[in-house]
Image: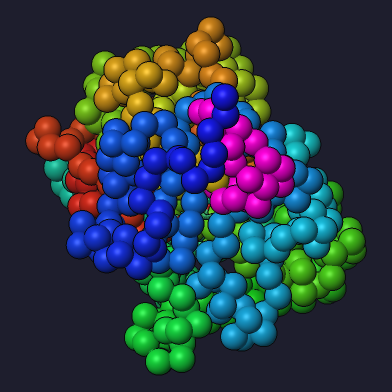
Amino acid sequence: TVQNFSEIPGLWRNGLANLYSFWKLDGFRNIHRVMVHNFKTFGPIYREKIGYYDSVNIIKPEDAAILFKAEGHYPKRLTVEAWTSYRDYRNRKYGVLLKNGEDWRSNRVILNREVISPKVLGNFVPLLDEVGQDFVARVHKKIERSGQDKWTTDLSQELFKYALESVGSVLYGERLGLMLDYINPEAQHFIDCISLMFKTTSPMLYIPPAMLRRVGAKIWRDHVEAWDGIFNQADRCIQNIYRTMRQDTNTHGKYPGVLASLLMLDKLSIEDIKASVTELMAGGVDTVTSITLLWTLYELARHPDLQEELRAEVAVARQSTQGDMLQMLKMIPLVKGALKETLRLHPVAVSLQRYITEEIVIQNYNIPCGTLVQLGLYAMGRDPDVFPRPEKYLPSRWLRTENQYFRSLGFGFGPRQCLGRRIAETEMQLFLIHMLENFRVDKQRQVEVHSTFELILLPEKPILLTLKPL
Ligand code: HEM
Ligand code: 2DC
């Protein structure tokens, strides 16, 4: 027989006491490890209440399937209150990231067509390919200047710029110029604001921002300053495009970018477009794609034979397509597998969450409609029952013949999945193609780098890599 909701194991009876022990365990920076530990203690389902934040946690792909079947027509994830509070405070509209219900759906459907549908890939690839080539040229220059035929560095700043340049070129159909020696201080400020925004968000997951705002806490003020910087920069970019668009209507059949396409389509209000384009710009910068690329280079440096295998795959694809990039992207299953493998071991999002819209049964427990259910993405990626020998970095796990049922969830799932997914995937694949064709990646000592939680999972310390021309 099915067991009652209140019988699910876990610590959920005293939210405040749990918040205190969570804090003592340094849980704020270790959510991912705390979750792994909880699954070990309680089994594949547990209930938890930390502060005011109450959820059921699951880890198995089969249970994820049940969860996503119950997400309803307007899937809703955990609200990051710091982000909505800022918008309420400054009277700004929510974009698709923060909207819910019918308002979310009507905006999302229109954005999907311009941002994530297969038809736009052909528009994105030439733009992103050019950024990839410029990145390679920049690394060659750095190597030359070093006078040592190699360049050893923490690539994260460079990757942030690559990511911002990529997303900027797709959104605005224009280059921002971040691959040059001298970069616009405004762009650097934008990048810094995004890092600050993420850093100041995670403590506010557990301490209500409204309260911090009332007492004038520094963390709230920093958070506001960070978002102000992000919105100001995005507003400037959007104004620019709007102006040039009105000046010349003739774009010579050239793809004008996501923003101009949305403006011409005229199906969303300008305010809605601004709100979502700002989120796309913020979501596209440092953090997500650049961190995933950094982890991938780190893994390739640790596995030189695998690196050669990927290089060979890219060489064959290049040969047989004569450099037709769109075709080439269809011939690199191992490179794509490497990116999935990176997101398995180093997911950006520690969990996926949904408020379920119907009652479900998971692991033989009843879960009522309206409950917040979290899939522990980091924990699932390291569960030996789900991924045999989980500690091994094996891109071949993701080849067609393998069982992938509800296992590849790094970008989320269903209609509420990552809107930037196509951009991110293409940008990362092109990056790896160009890097593999030009450089050997090496790292010094065999030290493990772990993750730390700052809203997203990041490397806990700098990753130093050495790039050598082939
Ligand atoms: C949402 C991951 C890159 C924009 C999400 C979600 C995840 C995710 C897990 C939540 C999905 C869900 O709840 O099912 C990633 C990863 C990335 C990446 C792993 C790169 C490696 C990007 C980029 C952009 C972006 C480059 C913008 C260009 C968004 C937006 C949403 C979202 C707007 C909210 C969508 C909605 O609520 O309808 N992402 N993301 N992401 N992401 Fe990404
Ligand atoms: C963080 O417990 C941990 O893609 C919380 O590009 C639950 C939670 C809710 C929403 C998640 C967030 C976590 C991690 C960062 C995510 C976010 C949804 C979108 C966001 C996954 C797992 C991200 C990074 C977006 C950010 C775009 C924004 C900067 C405009």
Location of residue 222 (image quadrant):
bottom left
Residue 233 visible, this angle:
no
Residue at image position (51%, 76%) is: 227
User: Residue 144 vs residue 218: left or right?
Assistant: left
- Along the line of sight, which residue is nearer the eye, 326 or 15? 15
Whether 42 is drawn above or below 461: the answer is above
Establish if 388 lies above or below 67. Answer: above
Residue 38 appears in the picture as rendered: yes
Q: Is residue 364 magenta?
A: yes
Q: Residue at the location (29% across, 33% down)?
A: 40
Q: Residue 305: x percent and y percent?
A: 26, 16
Residue 6 vs 302, above or below: the answer is below
Magenta extent: 352-372
User: How has the structure been colored for display?
Assistant: rainbow
Q: Is 219 situated above or below 109? A: below
Residue 443: x %, y % from top left: 18, 36
- In which quadrant will I find the C terminus? top left
Residue extending furthest top?
401
- How many numbered discs, if any? 0
Q: Quadrant of the N terminus?
A: top right
